[in-house]
């Protein structure tokens, strides 16, 4: 058998699903992403949400203002879909250089989704314009009906929302974000080139047992929630398959330690501190490290119709320990994903 490679040089990756937050929190986390990724699709679920091109432009400027000097990073902005969004906002988004997608949060599905959509029928004019102008819809694919078991919410969403959406707007580009189930993978794989899907590192590395390993583990809680091992295996098979419909989206979602370690802890895993290394570890676990570059650096850019990056990063097979905490807010740190644990790939250059 061939020795596994000890170094890996790949074209600089991009992150097609990222939460950067705002203000001091954003200033604390931005360098983790910008040190690894060339670009990132920045989620609009601020409080209040980013619903207009004007707000997206202001948010973009705030991001660039705290980018450490010498770092190159391009934030790709998104708008938060509401039932009140006029179709004219899509014209403005499409005409702008910096808005690349619209995010659909079912109302109540996840962190800061209260302003999201209750009935997609009320967004028809907006979706029609997006379909016409080629602006992708990024989908948080979970129903919010409390009578549906939390582990089934993605599968039910596909049947009750996505399949009708595809029928009504067959040309609408859409991304099923942070896929967590076999049903999600199979849906995306069965569709034409208008449909893609992102996969997080944490869903590739962990199954739902990690939520209850010796006690409740709030830092492994995110939405959509981790699923059983058979689903994780299916996600990893899709990520390493070379199918260009599947690409990298970390869904790195920082929350202060005190809001995660609480009676009602926030949903979201912070993974940007090892944003590419965690994927390297997942791909390596099935002997597929050579498939990382397409997934991380090519297919997302191709889907969005953007040029691929041209510079490279180097990863090295080397073990290091993830710190217990990282700076976040002046009086409240964050706990990074896999805090205190060993990881087997390290980023050499930035
Ligand atoms: C995200 C957040 O904290 O903003 N949380 C999460 O668990 N993934 C929101 C989201 O993408 O669902
Ligand atoms: Zn997210």
Image: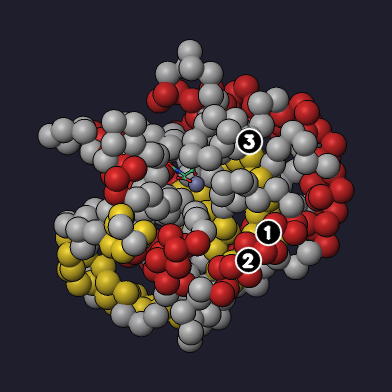
Q: Which structural element holds mark 3? A: loop
| Relative side of 73 to 35, left or right | right
Q: Above or below — where is 349 with respect to 153?
A: below
Quarter residue 227 falls in: top left
| Relative side of 141 to 228, left or right | right
| One can see residue 40 in this view | yes
Q: Position of residue 345 (x, y in %)?
A: 26, 68
| Relative side of 14 to 337, left or right | right
Q: Which of these two is toward me, 96 or 176?
A: 96
Q: Position of residue 334 (x, y in %)?
A: 31, 55
Disc 3: CA contacts within 10 A as few (<14), some (14-19) or many (>=20)? many
Q: Position of residue 179 (x, y in %)?
A: 48, 41
Identify which residue is drawn at 48% across, 17% down.
146
Identify which residue is drawn at 32% across, 74% down.
347
Is the residue marked 1 within 8 Å of ligand 2, measured from its CB? no
Identify which residue is drawn at 78% across, 41% down.
85
Is the residue marked 3 within 8 Å of ligand 1, measured from its CB? no
> Which residue is under mark 3?
115
- Of the numbered discs 2 and 3, the one sitting upstream in the chain is 2
Q: Which structural element holds mark 2? A: helix
């Amino acid at each position: 058998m061939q020795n596994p490679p000890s170094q890996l040089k790949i074209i600089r990756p991009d992150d097609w699903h990222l939460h950067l937050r705002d203000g001091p929190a954003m200033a604390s986390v931005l360098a983790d992403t910008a040190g690894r990724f060339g670009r990132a699709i920045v989620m609009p679920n601020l409080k209040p949400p980013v619903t207009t091109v004007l707000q997206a432009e202001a948010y973009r400027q705030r991001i660039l203002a705290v980018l450490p000097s010498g770092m190159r990073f391009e934030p790709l902005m998104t708008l938060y879909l509401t039932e009140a969004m006029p179709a004219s906002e899509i014209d403005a988004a499409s005409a702008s250089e910096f808005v690349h997608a619209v995010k659909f949060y079912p109302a109540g599905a996840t962190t800061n989704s209260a302003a999201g959509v209750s009935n997609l029928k009320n967004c028809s004019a907006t979706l029609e314009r997006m379909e016409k102008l080629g602006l992708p819809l990024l989908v948080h694919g979970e129903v919010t009906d409390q009578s549906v078991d939390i582990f089934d919410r993605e599968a039910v969403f596909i049947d009750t929302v996505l399949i009708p959406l595809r029928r009504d707007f067959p040309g609408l580009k859409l991304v099923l974000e942070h896929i967590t189930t076999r049903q999600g993978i199979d849906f995306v794989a069965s569709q034409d080139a208008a449909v893609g899907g992102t996969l997080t590192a944490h869903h590739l590395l962990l199954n739902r047992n990690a939520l209850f390993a010796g006690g409740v583990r709030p830092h492994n809680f995110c939405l959509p929630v981790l699923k059983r091992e058979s689903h994780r295996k299916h996600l990893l098979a899709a990520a390493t398959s070379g199918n260009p419909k599947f690409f990298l989206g970390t869904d790195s979602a920082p929350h202060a330690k005190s809001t995660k370690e609480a009676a009602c802890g926030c949903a979201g895993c912070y993974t940007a501190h090892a944003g590419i290394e965690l994927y390297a570890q997942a791909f390596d676990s099935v002997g597929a490290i050579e498939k990382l570059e397409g997934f991380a650096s090519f297919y997302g850019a191709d889907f969005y119709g953007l040029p691929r990056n041209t510079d490279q990063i180097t990863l090295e097979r080397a073990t290091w320990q993830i710190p217990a905490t990282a700076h976040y807010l002046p009086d409240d740190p964050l706990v990074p994903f896999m805090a205190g644990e060993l990881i087997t790939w390290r980023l050499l250059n930035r």
